[in-house]
Amino acid sequence: MVPIKFQTTEFLEGVTPKKFKSDILSMCENHKNQGRALAYAFLMYDFENPQIAEVLENKNYWNALHKISGKYLSVFYLNSREEHFAEDLNNQSGVVKRELCGIDSFEGLSSMIAPYFDLEDKVKLPSILFFQTRGRMITDYFVIELNEEKIEDSFLELKSYIKVAVENLKGVKPENYKNSESIFDLLKRGVEGEKIRKVFFKNIKTFPVQLVINWFVGKCF
């Protein structure tokens, strides 16, 4: 989990709005070179999705997602509340351990990201944008909408997508780490399969039980 904060003062290192794309791609390249990621995701949400903010601000939820994503998937998100996040890390250890990755307002998030990924004008938030890079280029991406509104359910939904993505990435052998397109295809198949599974089981739960019983009885007798 990689919180992103836009630079707000000359004393606080961070991502600058004007260099958003290049800064993100630079981080991605560093993560890949350091063996910290095989693919990437961007968690997109705004103030109308407080359940996502609650998940990210809960230490236990955040630690779980961070551990699951591990060294396979870097999950970026905008962090608006911890203005001194990287500065605090620096004070504690003497070294900034992770890239400073927040923003004073989430307004216009989709419009800011959309040009870099050729996204449609209206991306339903909250969503996860999974993407792949090669060098300083974005080579592929897809968006998965998040539908849960309760905090616990939202955490479980987010966890399930990150987990299935990582499980697919874990199957990649080290000698194939440079095959970025094939790696992303594995991730995409796993995540989209999880999406189909969720829709299927959700429909089953909402299907009238009496109809199922009548169908079963009719088949048996």
Image (cartoon, rainbow, N blue to C red):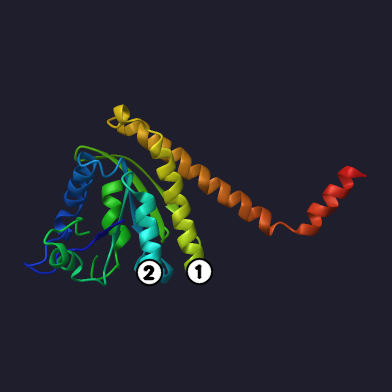
Q: Residue at x 35, y 69 (%)?
A: 57
- What label does residue 58 carry, if any? 2
User: How far is mark 1 from mark 2, CA to CA?
Assistant: 14 Å
Q: Residue at x 55, y 46 (%)?
A: 196
Q: Secondary structure at mark 2?
A: loop
Q: Is residue 208 left or right of residue 98?
A: right
* Residue type beneath disc 2: Asn
Q: Nearer the viewer, mark 1 or mark 2?
A: 2
Indicate the quadrant containing the N terminus: top left, top right, bottom left or bottom right.
bottom left
Q: Nearer the viewer, residue 145 or 77?
A: 77
Q: Give the image location of residue 41, x and y in percent.
A: 34, 50
Mark 1, Cα crowd under 10 Å, few <14 / some 14-19 / many 20+, is: few
Quarter containing the C terminus: top right
Picture layout, residue 5 above or below residue 182? below
Q: Which residue is depicted at the point 26% across and 72% down?
A: 81
Residue 75 in the image: above or below residue 7: above
> What residue is pinned by disc 1?
150
Q: Is residue 121 visible?
A: no
Residue type at the position of mark 1: Lys
Q: Position of residue 171 (x, y in %)?
A: 41, 34
Task: Name the spot of residue 204 as percent of width and height, x first.
Answer: 67, 53
Quarter holding residue 34: top left
Query: Is residue 37 in sight in this rendering?
Result: yes
